[in-house]
Amino acid sequence: MARIGIAGFLHETNTFAAGRASFATFVEADAWPGLLVGEEIFGAVSGVNLAIDGFIQAARPAHQLVPLLWASANPSGPVTQDAFEAITFMLDRMIRDAGPLDALFLDLHGAMVSEHLEDGEGELLRRLRHRVGATMPIVAALDFHANITPAMIDHASGLLAYRSYPHVDMMQTGRRAQVLLDKLLAGATMCKGYRQLPFLIPMPWQSTLSEPMRGLMALGESLASEQVFAAEFVPGFPLADIHHSGPSVIAYGADPIAVDAAVDALTQAVLARQSDFGGRLHAPADAVAHALERALRPGGGRVILADTQDNPGGGGGGDTTDLLHELLRQKAQRVCAGVLCDAGFVEAAARAGVGAVIHTPLGGVSGMGAGPLRVPFEVLGLGTGRFTGTGPFYLGCQMDLGPMARVRCGGPLGVEIVVSSRKQQAADQAMFRHVGANPSDYRILVLKSSVHFRADFAALASEILVVAAPGINVADLHQLRYEKLRPGVKLL
């Protein structure tokens, strides 16, 4: 039985976003728990689709687990220097004071940038390696969008990333990490393979529900053998303007020749498919017109408009209103949109109460796009914002989005809008049901999400359009000005 320290420190950083992730942001809960220390980690993450819970479930029967720290914040601009240093200091001291440990398991994102560091995880792992010494196994689970750096490879004994986008396998990734860590604890030789790829893949086209990503993920799994413990294609987070931004291929195993061969095979397969990473982005007016035309057809089904560029899951504020303006301009009916973030609007709706009509402007808090929606709103429902995620991605999450409201504008069959006080991408139907909206009751759904919504909503849709309304989670990377990428990296 080994004594294993476990911890989590997660942030996906969009360096083009103006906001910052402060220490208070990590303390505050959203879809995932806020800052946790010690034994409270076990209860807060139990049954949640998170890598740390998958590791706990797999390792607890055979090992003594020492819970240290968990901290996570919604994607945004860089983590403040104070927040990074405070949380890293806390974790370092907890490890120092935990008594003898045999190994560390870390639940990380892999795309953290702070105000003073481009490579947050690389620096974190460097400091922890200095704390525990050169030989102690450190295994980390990473997000599918990790920008894996040489420092991360050097200082970790093993890194494993989610294999799905939407990330429905976070818990399974923790279980895989436990298997890898057990090999290290048993004395297995761990050879590393690592290759960076010379391009950035836009977020909407990284989904593993379609090609080419589906096939590349399957190829990585197929390369595992007695000599190759894991081979992974990690697509990276393209909205980070840093030297090591972008996709990579990693592999671990007992035989260096077999590991190198697996890395080569997976790298060549990705390079061969790079021209296939793409799709159509729709302008808001065209997307709404198409959705309305389809809604009028007999058996036309339900259309989902993915408001990808204001996706809070990529650093967006969740508050732009351009699609809402367009829906009202084209007199759309039987529509539900969400989740819009505007705490002041929710407060006004709560004061007025269900059944009231309010004239409080909605959205546009960030100053991007068309600005606030200034129309009468009927308050249809209110909620605390505390509920449990039921979809495959947020399964088991004890969400806390702050007070919420559902309102309607544009007439009795018009546009309904689900509004929260804390931003969170619309990736779980429970967010809508919490305030009385059943997504299957509408002909058009407008979701502030890029890909994760597909896990819980795709089965409802006859068609999904990815819409390029204003937002900081830019889908066409050519619109961005990169200054720090390593030479030779191109934008797809």
Image (cartoon, rainbow, N blue to C red):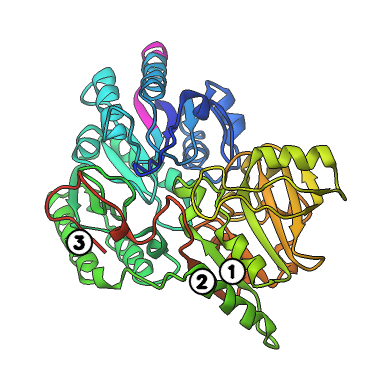
Determine if the magenta segment contains residue 66. no
State which region is magenta: 96-105
Q: How many residues crowd around disc 3 within 10 Å: few (fewer than 14), some, or many (20 or more)?
A: many
Q: Which residue is mark 2?
A: 465
Q: Which percent across, then down, holds residue 305?
A: 56, 67
Label 2 to label 3: alpha-carbon separation = 30 Å
Which residue is pictured at 64% across the width and 78% down the height?
Answer: 292
Q: Which percent across, then down, holds residue 384?
A: 75, 38
Look at the picture and state if 389 lies above or below 233.
Answer: above
- The quarter of the picture where the N terminus appears is top left
Amino acid type, label 3: Thr
Mark seen at residue 147: none
Can residue 183 be seen by looking at this rendering?
yes
Instruction: Indicate left or right for 460 with 450 as reference.
Output: right
Mark seen at residue 304: 1
Mark seen at residue 267: 3
Look at the picture and state if 5 lies above or below 228.
Answer: above
Label 1 to label 3: alpha-carbon separation = 34 Å
Residue at the far bottom: name it: 298
